[in-house]
Image (tube, helix red, strand yellow):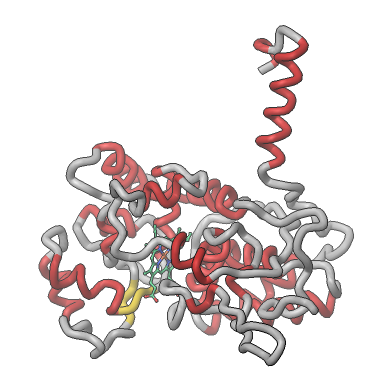
Amino acid sequence: MAASCTTTWRCAFLALLVLFVSGAHGQLSPTFYASTCPNLEAIVRSVMNTTVANEKRMGASLLRLHFHDCFVEGCDGSVLLDNVPATPTTPAFFGERNAFGNINSLRGFDVIAKIKTAVEQACPGVVSCADILTLAARDGTVLLGGPTWTVPLGRRDSTTASMDLANRDLPPPFANLTSPDGSGLIERFVRKGLSAAEMTVLSGAHTIGSAQCQNYRLRLYNEARIDFQFAEGLKANCPQNGPANDTFLAPLDSTGSTFDNKYYADLTSLRGLLHSDQVLYPQNNQTQVKIVLKYKGDNAAFFADFAAAMIKMGNLSPLTGTAGQIRTNCSIVNR
Ligand code: HEM
């Protein structure tokens, strides 16, 4: 960059550009709470240790909760806000929890509340729910055998949430890889500043956790690009006509609660559980095929790229400085 900085106006422009690009992360920094809450990471890890030891799936559920927070107006804890019924003087508030992809599906709110209580005891009024969720997602990944990464911190919590934006921005399991109307997986992630390659590595989160029959039923009964035995095995507990067994859970990949690259091997055997998983390995897109084969053959590359993409996703439009607030209770806006 210095080599091309030959005139004053050009230098000024480049300096502004650097400021703009680095400013996109606000003032997030791994040492944000170093003096105000030095034990934060240890407190989060301690609750996560017990939680995941009791129920492995919760590590996956918190990773997903963080993704659903970040994809709707940035990582601002908005997904954690509860609905509030109308009063004689105020209208009802509908948060993101009731959006299509979230209702009867998102889990882990109680774990975030538990961590928040422990954090508030140690450092009252200092740490945001958005940061707690980001750390819990990282720890859930690590505790199930996945990569670790340093989490930039300093997000603040929103005072609003939007069910409409959640319905608009969260990708559904029937999404295609691309679509002329912009509803494809690639377009949805690109709108958030994440590339097709980053979308593909982030989808590797489906190496852990489960999905409900209602989210993979259509794939079992309507799709050709599915392994016959895999589909037949799943059909036993996911009958063609709902609502029977709508909520029956199947693991998202063949190694269930272990974070590894088996997800990508499953895609190449046409054993992706969701339609949105299998479309990442299409017949007609060599770029995608190459990405999937790379991660199938190189667990270290998957881990490194996943960690980098998680940091990037975690930096989506954070509230910093004096914006937003530090909620006392993660599911309610401070009065
Ligand atoms: C690419 C678009 C994506 C789509 C269409 C999608 C869709 C889904 C669906 C439908 C489920 C099952 C929910 C249920 O049946 O209750 C699920 C589970 C899950 N998703 Fe995604 N997802 C996507 C990307 C991601 C990303 C980027 C992450 C995290 C980085 C993620 C993490 C997870 C995890 C960990 C689970 C399991 C949760 C649990 O067991 O509680 N997903 N996803």
Residue 51 visible to the viewer: yes
Q: Is residue 334 left or right of residue 292?
A: right
Q: What residue occupies the far right of the structure in this picture?
A: 35
Residue 284, percent from left and from top: 19, 41
User: Residue at 11% of width from left, 61% of height from top?
Assistant: 224
114 relative to 59, above or below:
below
Residue 306, percent from left and from top: 49, 50
Residue 96, percent from left and from top: 54, 73
Q: Is residue 7 left or right of residue 237?
A: right
266 relative to 179, above or below:
below
Quadrant holding ligand 1? Answer: bottom left
Q: Quadrant of residue 41?
A: bottom right
Q: Is residue 52 left or right of residue 241?
A: right
Q: What residue occupies the far front of the structure in this picture?
A: 89
Q: Quadrant of residue 161?
A: bottom right
User: Residue at 73% of width from left, 8% of height from top?
Assistant: 7
User: Residue at 27% of width from left, 67% of height from top?
Assistant: 273
Residue 37, percent from left and from top: 84, 65
